[in-house]
Amino acid sequence: MINSVTNTTPGTSSVGQVQGRGMDSLGQGDFLKLLTVQMQQQDPFDPVDNKEMLAQMAQFSSLAGVAETNASLERIADKLDLLIKSNQSPSDA
């Protein structure tokens, strides 16, 4: 478990508030960075519980699946919009 955190991350102010990106813009790369730092900073004599690590990995896998599904649905919606537009007669537009 991480007991203390230092404020050395770019994009943070002196009070530790994240500036710039919102939570909606975090992605897989951000998760992997956090996971890497967590593993580097953990106490080797008191590592993170295996159940917690597996739960985090399961959440990450689930999140990745949801992101892929959302991307696929957006592509389908775009194609349906194009199909609807192409099937409209000039007098309908």
Image (cartoon, rainbow, N blue to C red):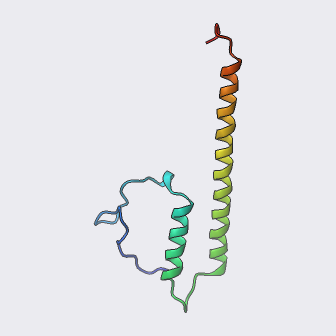
Image quarter for residue 59?
Answer: bottom right
Give percent across and percent down for residue 50.
65, 80
Q: Which one is nearer the viewer's eye here, 2 or 11?
A: 11
Closer to the camera in the image, 41 or 50: 41
Q: Position of residue 64 (x, y in %)?
A: 64, 58
**Residue 77, located in which quarter of the rendered image?**
top right
In the orientation shown, which residue stands out farthest toward the bottom?
A: 45
- Quick check: 37 above or below 21? below
Q: In the image as oriented, which residue stretches furthest toward the left?
A: 14
Give the residue furthest to the top: 91
Q: Residue 69: horizontal and vertical position, in percent?
A: 69, 48
Query: Is 15 on the left or on the right of 65, as rendered?
Result: left
Residue depicted at 34% across the width and 66% down the height: 16
Q: Please give the name of the residue rendered at 35% of the width and 72% of the height, measured from the top-left corner.
A: 8
Residue 62 lies, with reference to residue 6, above or below; the image says above
The residue positioned 65% from the left and 28% from the top of the image is 81
Q: Quadrant of the C terminus?
A: top right
The number of numbered discs placed on residues in the rendered structure image is 0
x and y, in percent, of residue 24 in the image = 50, 51
Q: In the displayed structure, would residue 37 be above or below residue 78?
A: below
Determine the residue positioned at 66% across, 51% down.
68
In the depicted view, which residue is nearer to us: 10 or 5?
A: 10
